[in-house]
Amino acid sequence: MTEEQITMNQVEALHVALQQSFSPDQNVRDPAEATIKNLKFIPGATQMLLHITEEKQVQYEVRQAAAIQLKNICRECWVERVSFSGLPLPPVDADESGAASKKPPLLLEEDKTAVKKKLVVCLLAEPDKSIRDLMAETVHCIAIHDFPTSWPDLLPLLLHAISQNADPSQALRVHNALLALRKVCKRYEYKSREQRGPLNEIVIQSFPLLLPLAQRLSGPEEHSLEGALMLKQVLKIFWSSTQFYLPSGPNNSDGTANIAPSPALANPETMQPWFDILRAALVKPLPEASEGLEPRNQPTSKEERNAWPWWKVKKWAAQIITRLFSRYGIPNYAEDEVKEFAQHFSQNVAPQFLGPICETLNLRPSGRFCTDRVVHLCLNFVDLAVELAPTYKLLKPHMDFLLYKVCFPAMCLTEEDIEEFENDPHEFVHKQNSPLSDFYDPRMSAITLVTSAVKYRGQGYDAASLGVLDGDFAEVQCHRGGEPQPHREGLRIARVWIVGGGSLGEKEVCRGARRVDGQQRLSRFQ
């Protein structure tokens, strides 16, 4: 059904059905939900949903519901859904036996063309985060099947919007174009070299625009939240383009992907501008709101700080450089084609980041805020640097600070942990044993760093660690006249088990544990 054939009466009827789906009256809600469920069988439904989604005067909840239905229909009805074995999948709304009322038809070509023509235009102008995220996900669902062959104008449209970044009035369109471009890049993030041809072309065409934009947004004069949001999207695009393979050159003349090693591997200096951007993002100071300095208005609650765009920028910068270090920066583990790049990275790039990483890790010991995720990623970077001789030589004078002012405090339980243990012990045990904690918990990365320090740079750290533990227990014993703090002993004893189980030699641990345990027992009778 063409756009001209869709009447406003049909759009209005769909608008009413979406609105009635929120009704508390079941007699009104059930027929509306049945109508919405049947949309996939109605030609032109996707165009009507998109029309409602883009209309700013429509009630917000109705727009959001329309965007959700549009995404679901495009995901289910764009092409026939098949399993990895090639067998057709049951409809999304099938019951437990796999039976559904009837198989949904594929969208008509007229509907597909109309949606692709209008979807990106609507996305670029959408200010609401929830709705634009739904639209961007719809772009991703369509791009999986149609980009680049059946949607050749998608990339030029996005790049044209990004090219207007010098105009402050176009900030929303630029950000939303970056969001859509990231969704397209994510499609190829884990593909093999043979399947990364479209991503290589995206890099060739987009990075000349993204690099100067990121350089400007990471500069010391940029403090706006809009700038942080755009920089975050640029870094996410860079992540999707580089974290598995560095981009290769142009595709072959027959359109197939160029599987030759990336030109950056032979000429590592070409990536230095991107390293400068990552470094600038890491060193950018983020003052408290009470200080009145730029960037202003940092939230005060932990949850809001974790979601604040400037902390997200730091998180992505730390994640990218840590990933590059682990995959390309250690010569002993590098593949033959990466050896030259690994040598350059270990000797020239990694040392550049030790200062910013250590300054970031010094935030908490200095009484300032830093998100758990940023601490976790920075500790992972230091863990890699301990193993590598050129970086460890620079780190060595600061290892006492890193181990005893950063790692050991991170190992201890927090007041929130104690409260959760007392109120919900099952959830506490679940979190402490979650396999996902290795990917976000600073406590786990701190344990890994202490382990690596003893494993690779060994003698001296084990005895020093036990010396710190002795001091911890002495601190516990000093709490005689004040309020009892039974959990402090548990926090300090945890260090013995952490260090003993993962880092120190068995005999040394036994001697140290017996010594501190004996001191602990004697103190109770004094």
Image: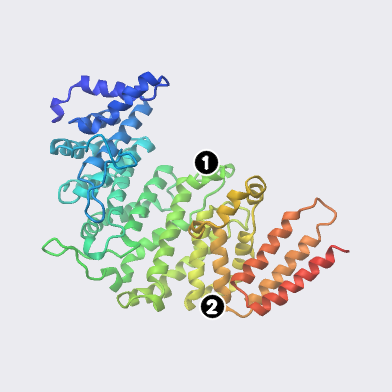
Q: Left or right of 372: which side holds 473?
A: right
- Please count the marks in the image: 2
Secondary structure, mark 2, is helix
Q: Quadrant of residue 66?
A: top left
In this image, 465 relative to 257: left or right? Answer: right
The Cα atoms of the two marked residues, 2 and 1, are separated by: 43 Å
The mark nearer the N terminus, 2 or 1, is 1
Residue at disc 1, secondary structure: loop
Point out residue 501 in the picture as x, y percentages from the top left corner. Answer: 61, 70
Tell me the residue at 68%/78% (across/down): 508
Label disc, if present, on residue 65 of the rendered structure: none
Measuring from the top left, give residue 415's x and y in whole percent. Answer: 66, 50
Q: Quadrant of the C terminus?
A: bottom right
Residue 123 locus on image (x, y percent): 29, 38
At 22% from the left and 51% from the top, the residue drawn is 87
- Looking at the image, residue 126 lies above or below residue 261: above
Residue 380: horizontal and vertical position, in percent?
49, 64
Question: Crowding near pointer 2: few (<14 within 10 Å), some, many (20+)?
Answer: few
Mark 1: amino acid: Asn
Q: Residue furthest left?
A: 254
Q: Which mark is residue 297?
A: 1
In front: 311, or 473? Answer: 473
Name the residue tied to disc 2. Answer: 456
Q: Is residue 504 visible?
A: yes
Task: Please indicate, yes or no, whether residue 58 appears anywhere in the rendered image.
Answer: no
| Nearer to us in this view, 239 or 429 | 429
Hey, what amino acid is under mark 2? Answer: Tyr
Residue at 58% in and 69% down:
450
Q: Judge the density around disc 1: few (<14), some (14-19), many (≥20) Cα neighbours within 10 Å.
A: some
